[in-house]
Amino acid sequence: MKTTVSTIIEEIKAGRRPKSKKRRRDNPRDVFHEYLDDAFWIAATTIHDKSKSSMNEKRLATSNLIVNHVTGIEAFFRNVVVHNKAWSGNGIEALMREKISISDAYSLIQKGNVRLEHVIAETFSFNELSQIGTVMKALTGCTKDFWVEVEEHEVDTLDAGHGLVTINFLDMHPDWRKETLEMYKERNRYVHEGVMTKRNSRSTVELHNLVKHLIDHSNDYLVQRWKIKS
């Protein structure tokens, strides 16, 4: 079935869970799925309001959606770093030597009860794919480029025509790096220069699916390969 804005909204409605004031910490992947779905829903109400929304308002809504999706990737990886202790000790030491000054360390220690993982998440930038890859490669100790390992990681998934199939992220999104880097450029142009995106609704749907799949696949890779907490 063709994926459209309407089908995504229906899927969001069907999968939405009731909010609870007292709820245990959820799987980070699910938390950020919900965040991305909320961002998509808010933007879609403006983008597809044929009677009221001007073209400028639609571009503004899409630009904010892009910012939210980039933020979702950044926040997901920060969250994964902070809430796990299964990282490479050598990798943590290398990152600390590279980035942390005595002043930084003192400032963070003053906050109290600070773990090394928290120091890394607070001190290193997660604003670009390359920066995320550098941190995650050091923490996991993976031998290849972190993103190469993620895109080559195989998962089992249900295919409408073939049943259970094994697929990797690169099979699903052959141009994912190019598309993701373009998303980051659009975010930067909007945030720093006020230049709004010109994406159409189809491209927006593809972007939403790509980011959710990227988080899914990264999460599965980290859980299966490095045994981090899901």
Image (cartoon, rainbow, N blue to C red):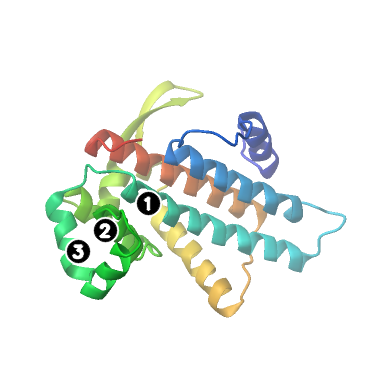
Residue sitting at the far top:
163
Find out whether the residues at labels 1 and 2 contact each other: C-beta distance under 8 Å: yes
Asked whether the viewer can see residue 10, the reply is: yes
Amino acid type at mark 2: Val
The answer for how far apart the CA atoms under marks 1 and 2 are is 10 Å
* Residue 138 placement (x, y as % from top left): 20, 55
In the image, which disc is placed on residue 96? 3
Secondary element at tag 1:
helix
> Picture coordinates of residue 192 (x, y %)?
54, 77
Task: Provide the residue designation for mark 1.
Answer: 77
Q: Is residue 67 left or right of residue 198?
A: left
Instruction: Kindly report the distance in space between the C-alpha atoms of the residues bearing marks 3 and 2.
Output: 11 Å
Residue linked to disc 2: 135
Amino acid type at image mark 3: Met
Front-most of 87 and 176? 87
Q: Is residue 84 above or below residue 196?
A: above
Split into 4 quadrants, where in the image is the N terminus? top right
Left or right relative to 134: residue 177: right
Location of residue 12 in the rendering, given as x and y in whole percent from the top left corner: 63, 36
| Disc 3 to disc 1, C-alpha distance | 18 Å
Which of the two labelled residues, at mark 1 and mark 2, occupies the earlier sequence position?
Answer: 1
Asked whether residue 130 appears in the rendered view, the answer is no
Q: Tell me where residue 171 appears, x and y as whole percent.
A: 38, 41
